[in-house]
Image (cartoon, helix red, strand yellow):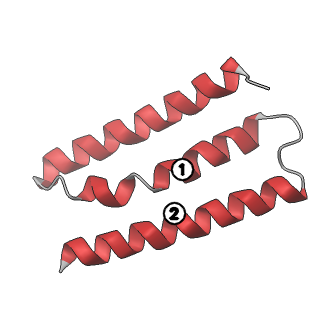
Amino acid sequence: MFDATLWLAALGVLAAFAFAGWLLSLRLRDVSIVDSLWSLMFVLAAATYAWLADGALDARGVLVLVLVTAWALRLAGYIAWRNHG
């Protein structure tokens, strides 16, 4: 079921993170950091949904959050490593 309140809350968190990433890229004069940050936005969205949704932190919800986090950290680390060298 679609919940506009959850969606808007997650949108606000993601917009703030994206804006902070953009400001950091301006400061560093390196837009390639955005490549590493976009996968972390999935973690933020999943964590926001899990925190605000009723009953989302059951065993299945925690498993999904852990798997999304593991995938996002692996991808962000790999892209950062690839762009750095």
Please give the name of the residue rendered at 59% of the width and 69% of the height, measured from the top-left corner: 70
Residue 41, compared with residue 15, is above or below; it is: below
Q: Residues within 10 Å of mark 1 (few under 14, many from 20)?
A: some
Q: Quadrant of the N terminus?
A: top right
Q: Which residue has dot 2 on it?
A: 72
Residue 36, compared with residue 22, is above or below; it is: below
Q: Is residue 15 left or right of residue 57?
A: left
Q: Quadrant of the C terminus?
A: bottom left
Q: Are marks 1 and 2 in contact (CB under 8 Å)?
A: yes
Q: For residue 35, which quarter of the picture?
A: bottom left
Q: Position of residue 36 (x, y in %)?
A: 34, 61
Q: CA distance from mark 1 to mark 2?
A: 7 Å
Please give the name of the residue rendered at 89% of the width and 41% of the height, measured from the top-left corner: 55
Q: Which residue has dot 1 on it?
A: 42
Q: Secondary structure at mark 2?
A: helix
Q: Position of residue 37 (x, y in %)?
A: 37, 55
Residue 37, compared with residue 50, is above or below; it is: below
Q: Earlier in the sequence, mark 1 or mark 2?
A: 1
Q: Nearer the viewer, residue 44 or 60?
A: 60
Q: Secondary structure at mark 1?
A: helix
Q: Residues within 10 Å of mark 2 (few under 14, many from 20)?
A: many
Q: Position of residue 38 (x, y in %)?
A: 39, 51
Identity, as a three-letter code, of the amino acid under mark 2 = Ala
Residue 63 numbered tag: none
Identity, as a three-letter code, of the amino acid under mark 1 = Phe
Q: Position of residue 71 (x, y in %)?
A: 56, 67
